[in-house]
């Protein structure tokens, strides 16, 4: 069969349009603002050579942060302000925003992370995740100086306009509703979602969403972390997913066609975020200064912008 050369320009335009659309939805979301080190030659191919969760230069870093991935959109501004207060650290902060479980696996593997043919080995100064996980690491003798600094609630993420009429957690069990949900193996938020599902519909709702639908393929678990959920919604692969409310706020703030469905307080679960200084931290003073910074009004205001809240005085820090 002869090639249809007259169709080639149209096909090239279609590929270019598809690539542009992908570039708008694929991370890194912040268009280079997530890199706190001086940039070298920029080599980036969407969904191929794309490492959105490693930020900066680990070589010669003077502060290394391992931070749960759901805070990735707050970090560029936090790091920039912290560097203004500590100019000696400017360009020398390296941080990772992978799921807490993956970060712990990295620590357990001699602080090494392998991506394809690249292995990065860097000792963290600070580890940040849910308070329960951080306290567990404290009891295990891995870190100290625990500082709780923010809270967050869950929300249901859907496409703008809510075309499938999803208004509650119970709606997620409806046949035909395709879901993207955090993987319980490494995403701590899965525990909070499980508790929320049980509050809303008992064991039956949890089983349908996290077991039956996983088995049937109507629930897709995340492969990295729940920033995949808005991408899957925008690409039409799923209809909804449960994420932190802050992630809905972020997607809306950058103009993506995403909206949130509120989960009532009686069914919701509040997470407390905390960090600690690793016991073998190479830069313990900088680590302690970073954690103290997270409690300042400046840092708290940046968290508030995306729907995080300050820690109420009545909340236990245990």
Image: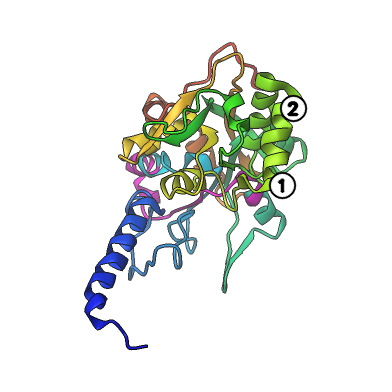
Where does residue 220 sit, x and y in percent of width and height?
Answer: 61, 47
Please tell me the numbered disc located at residue 183: none
**Colour basis:** rainbow
Q: Is residue 88 magenta?
A: yes
Residue positioned most to the top: 314
Considering the image in quadrants, where does the C terminus appear?
A: top right
Q: Is residue 16 above or below residue 151?
A: below
> In front: 83, or 243?
243
Residue in the image at 64% along x and 24% along y: 196
The residue segment tinted magenta is 79-102
Which residue bears the numbered disc 1?
215
Q: In the drawing, does residue 8 fall left or right of residue 160? A: left
Tell me if label 1 and label 2 are in contact, CB under 8 Å. no
Where does residue 260 sit, x and y in percent of width and height?
Answer: 44, 29
Considering the image in quadrants, where does the N terminus appear?
A: bottom left
Q: Is residue 210 above or below residue 120?
A: above
Which residue bears the numbered disc 2?
204
- Are there few (<14), some (14-19), or many (20+) residues within 10 Å of tag 2? few
Where does residue 159 sit, x and y in percent of width and height?
Answer: 41, 37
- Are there few (<14), some (14-19), or many (20+) residues within 10 Å of tag 1? few
> In front: 210, or 107?
210
Q: In the drawing, does residue 259 fall left or right of residue 105? A: left
- Is residue 308 visible in the rendered image? The answer is no
Which type of secondary structure does the marked residue at label 1 adopt?
A: helix
Q: CA distance from mark 1 to mark 2?
A: 15 Å
Residue positioned most to the front: 1
Mark 1 vs 2, N-terminal side: 2
- Is residue 16 visible in the rendered image? The answer is yes
Q: Is residue 270 above or below residue 54?
A: above
């Amino acid at each position: 069969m002869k090639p249809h050369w007259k169709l080639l320009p149209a096909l090239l335009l279609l590929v270019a349009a598809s690539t542009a659309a992908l570039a708008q939805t694929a991370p890194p979301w912040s268009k280079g603002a997530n890199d706190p080190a001086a940039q070298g030659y920029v080599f980036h191919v969407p969904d191929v050579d794309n490492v959105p969760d490693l930020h900066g230069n680990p070589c010669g870093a003077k502060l290394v942060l391992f931070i749960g991935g759901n805070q990735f959109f707050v970090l560029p501004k936090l790091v920039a302000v912290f560097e203004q207060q500590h100019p000696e650290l400017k360009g020398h902060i390296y941080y990772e925003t992978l799921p807490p479980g993956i970060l712990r696996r990295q620590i357990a593997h001699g602080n090494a992370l392998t991506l394809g043919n690249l292995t990065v080995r860097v000792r963290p100064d600070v580890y940040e995740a849910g308070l329960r996980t951080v306290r567990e690491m404290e009891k295990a003798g891995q870190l100290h100086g625990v500082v709780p600094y923010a809270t967050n609630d869950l929300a249901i993420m859907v496409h703008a306009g809510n075309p499938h009429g999803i208004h509650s957690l119970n709606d997620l069990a409806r046949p035909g509703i395709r879901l993207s949900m955090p993987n319980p193996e490494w995403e701590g938020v899965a525990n909070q979602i499980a508790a929320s599902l049980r509050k809303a519909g008992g064991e039956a709702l949890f089983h349908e969403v996290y077991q039956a639908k996983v088995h049937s393929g109507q629930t897709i678990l995340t492969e990295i972390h729940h920033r995949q959920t808005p991408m899957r919604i925008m690409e039409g692969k799923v209809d909804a997913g449960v994420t932190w409310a802050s992630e809905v706020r972020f997607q809306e703030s950058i103009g993506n066609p995403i909206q949130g469905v509120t989960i009532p307080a009686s069914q919701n679960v509040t997470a407390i975020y905390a960090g600690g200084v690793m016991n073998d931290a190479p830069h313990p003073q900088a680590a302690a200064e970073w954690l103290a910074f997270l409690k300042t009004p400046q840092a708290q205001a940046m968290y508030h912008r995306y729907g995080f809240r300050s820690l109420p005085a009545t909340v236990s820090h245990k």
